């Protein structure tokens, strides 16, 4: 588990227990808690977290990733900006498909 946590490259470890639902009043607590079960992974579904700056999207993404690591699932954390930069660079270098297969979507 420690190795998977390091490989995930989380900027910090965040958990669902630490998330302040009172601060992010628009966050649908029931839906967010259901994401904790990771059943979306079993169904091969994607999750998109939308909202204004500062409401905890990154915290929740890391918390879901950390739950997956605890379940023995390999995870890689990246921001949307970093992902777009990686893909743009890979496309310019002719490595787009390889990058998707190897690092981004693996």
Image (spheres, helix red, strand yellow):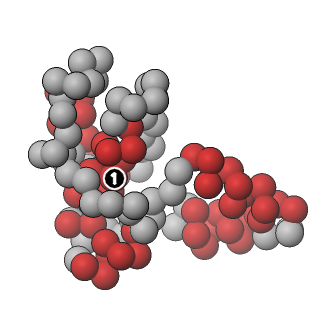
Which residue corresponds to the image point at 41% horizontal and 50% vertical from the top-left?
A: 44
Q: Is residue 8 left or right of residue 71?
A: right
Where residue 28 appears, as percent x and y from the top left, is: 25, 23
**Image-based side of 99 in relation to 27, left or right:** right
- Please tell me how many numbered marks the rendered image carries: 1
Q: Is residue 74 above or below residue 55?
A: below
Q: Is residue 42 visible?
A: no
Image x and y of residue 68, in percent = 27, 60
Residue 76 placement (x, y as % from top left): 45, 64
Q: Residue at x 24, y 18 (%)?
A: 25
Report the side of 31 relative to 52 (left or right): left
Along the line of sight, the residue nearer the viewer: 64 or 12: 12
User: What residue is at 18 percent from the left and 34 percent from the top?
Assistant: 20
Q: Secondary structure at mark 1?
A: helix
| Residue 49 seen in render | yes
The residue closer to the viewer here, 53 or 73, is: 53
x%, y% of residue 81?
62, 47
Dot 1: few (<14), some (14–19), or many (≥20) neighbours within 10 Å? many
Which of these two is toward me, 75 or 89?
89
Q: Residue furthest bottom?
A: 3
- The residue identified by callout 1 is 62
């Amino acid at each position: 588990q420690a190795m998977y946590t390091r490989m995930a490259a989380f900027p910090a470890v965040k958990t669902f227990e630490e998330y302040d639902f009172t601060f992010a009043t628009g966050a649908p607590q029931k839906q967010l808690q259901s994401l904790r079960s990771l059943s979306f992974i079993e169904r091969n579904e994607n999750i998109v977290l939308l909202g204004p700056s500062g409401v905890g999207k990154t915290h929740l993404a890391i918390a879901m990733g950390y739950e997956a690591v605890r379940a023995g699932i390999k995870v890689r954390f990246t921001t949307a900006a970093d992902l777009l930069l990686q893909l743009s660079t890979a496309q310019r270098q002719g490595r787009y498909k390889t990058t998707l297969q190897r690092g981004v979507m693996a």
